[in-house]
């Protein structure tokens, strides 16, 4: 391997007995974390990005050791082999470490999977069968699953599905108004994504407020590079912004979110773009990036300060869409107890939180500017004491949620 390597002192952490290895394979990335499901203690985490290119970037942190390299990582299998070797080089033989499970984030569970599921040959076949619903993600997830079964044959693998939390969406929220026969034949409905995060965060909200989960009506805003909103009534999700694919809903880093479907036809018929070109345009070249060339809010804020009009418009479109969903979910829920921001933008961007909920005093929402400006990794309230609706910031932790669900199903 070529590139930059930095080695620190070797990890002095004890062997990770009882730990779960969580694998999150995206279309061109692999994230992993080795952590304890009860304590949340993290032994190691890493990420391989730009898989399939000549300059894949690799980061592995384990105890005091930090490895950063640039290399050509051909595919997900090579990425996993690389990660396992990093563990070995740092004194952790994963196959002999006493892991309780490998937890896999699987993006699409279709209509079949709505609970953490121990992976068998039959489960692999079924995930393969539903892969056309998530053509960029499920195949990568499957490679992660096969690799774990090859390299760690004695450790049970568990699939945790991104769609699972929303499997019980009411029919009215899950149904697209298209021909029923076509929809049924092709499994077309709204599935929802980021479910692990919405599930984890909404439960932490109940803990934070000291309230019973089942008695709370909540709106959760997961605003990261991907973004989604959910409405949860008395412990049950009743709506969410992502649909059959993770493209629907809010404006995201590189994804458009909601569009007139006629626009897609126009791009094909008139602009002569192929289906794959439209796919790339809407998933990778749209959203904030399409509007102003940047998808990171820190860069966008800097551009706005420098007077960049495209960045200003991108921000305004983002906030406009977000407020539209918040408004819709307030009506759907009728009574709202808590609105919670999470993920990279939600946890860190003071202006996004302020602007998303500005001027809603008549609806019982009052943001406390000082509380909103505090930076912290802890769950916190940013609404004023006299705000009827609690507005919170709660960091998400999908790896911990996957580790816990995996350990529980194996036990
Ligand atoms: P995630 O997908 O949850 O990892 O979120 C990634 C996104 O969070 C980035 O693309 C940034 O837009 C945003 N982000 C991360 N840190 C900050 C920060 N300190 N201020 C504003 N935005 C941030």
Image: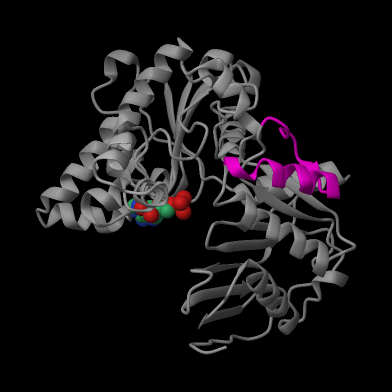
Side of 122 relative to 198 (left or right): right
Q: How is the image coloured?
A: one colour
Side of 105 relative to 365 (left or right): right
| In this view, 263 is above or below 395 | above
Residue 237 is drawn in which quadrant? top right
What is the span of residues highlighted in magenta in the rendered image? 111-133
Query: Is residue 367 something that shows in the picture?
Result: no
Q: Judge whether residue 130 is colored magenta.
A: yes
Side of 306 relative to 320 (left or right): left
Considering the image in quadrants, where does the N terminus appear?
Answer: bottom right
Residue 168 is drawn in which quadrant? top right
| In this view, 157 is above or below 390 | below
Query: Is residue 321 something that shows in the picture?
Result: yes
Residue 398 in the image, given as x and y percentages of width and height: 60, 47
Q: Nearer the viewer, residue 239 or 132?
A: 132
Residue 381 in the image, given as x and y percentages of width and height: 44, 34
Residue 76 in the image, given as x and y percentages of width and height: 63, 67
Label total for image? 0
Please name the residue shown 52% across and 71% down the image: 52
Please name the residue shown 69% across and 47% down the image: 402
Q: Judge whether residue 89 is colored magenta.
A: no
Please name the residue shown 57% across and 31% down the image: 202
Residue 282 in the image, given as x and y percentages of width and height: 36, 46
Q: Nearer the viewer, residue 35 or 246?
A: 246
Side of 317 relative to 275 (left or right): left
| In this view, 193 is above or below 87 | above
Please name the residue shown 38% across and 47% down the image: 345
Residue found at the far bottom of this picture: 2
Considering the image in quadrants, where does the C terminus appear?
Answer: top right
């Amino acid at each position: 391997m070529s590139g930059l390597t930095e080695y620190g002192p070797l990890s002095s952490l004890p062997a990770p007995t009882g730990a779960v290895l969580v694998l999150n394979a995206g279309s061109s990335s692999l994230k992993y974390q080795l952590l304890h499901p009860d304590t949340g203690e993290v032994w190691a985490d890493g990420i391989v990005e730009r898989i399939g290119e000549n300059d894949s970037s690799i980061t592995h942190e384990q105890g005091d050791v930090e490895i950063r390299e640039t290399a050509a990582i051909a595919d997900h299998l090579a990425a996993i082999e690389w990660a396992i070797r990093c563990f070995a080089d740092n004194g952790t033989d994963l196959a002999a470490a006493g892991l309780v499970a490998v937890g896999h984030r699987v993006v699409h569970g279709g209509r079949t999977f709505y609970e953490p599921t121990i992976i068998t040959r039959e489960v692999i076949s079924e995930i393969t069968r539903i892969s056309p619903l998530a053509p960029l993600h499920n195949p990568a997830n499957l490679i992660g699953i096969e690799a774990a079964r090859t390299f760690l044959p004695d450790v049970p693998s568990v699939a945790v599905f991104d769609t699972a939390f929303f499997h019980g969406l009411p029919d009215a929220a899950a149904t697209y108004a298209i021909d029923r026969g076509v929809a049924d034949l092709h499994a077309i409905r709204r599935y929802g994504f980021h479910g692990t995060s919405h599930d984890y965060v909404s439960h932490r909200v109940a803990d934070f407020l000291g309230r019973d989960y089942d008695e709370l009506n909540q709106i959760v805003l997961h605003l990261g590079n991907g973004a989604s909103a959910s409405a949860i009534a008395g412990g049950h999700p009743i709506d969410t912004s992502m649909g059959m694919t993770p493209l629907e809903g809010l404006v995201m880093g590189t994804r458009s979110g909601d569009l007139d479907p006629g626009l897609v036809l126009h791009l094909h018929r008139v602009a002569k773009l192929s289906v794959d070109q439209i796919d790339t345009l809407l998933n990778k070249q749209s959203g904030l990036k399409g509007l102003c060339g940047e998808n990171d809010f820190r860069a966008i804020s800097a551009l706005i300060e420098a007077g960049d009009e495209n960045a200003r418009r991108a921000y305004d479109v983002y906030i406009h869409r977000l407020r539209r969903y918040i408004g819709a979910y307030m009506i759907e829920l009728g009574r709202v107890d808590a609105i919670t921001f999470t993920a990279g933008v939600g946890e860190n961007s003071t202006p996004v939180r302020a602007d998303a909920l500005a001027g809603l005093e008549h609806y019982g929402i009052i943001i406390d500017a000082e509380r909103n400006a505090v930076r912290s990794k802890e769950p916190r309230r940013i609404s004023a004491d006299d705000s009827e609706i609690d507005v919170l910031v709660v960091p998400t932790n999908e790896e911990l949620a996957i580790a816990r669900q995996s350990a529980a199903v194996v036990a």
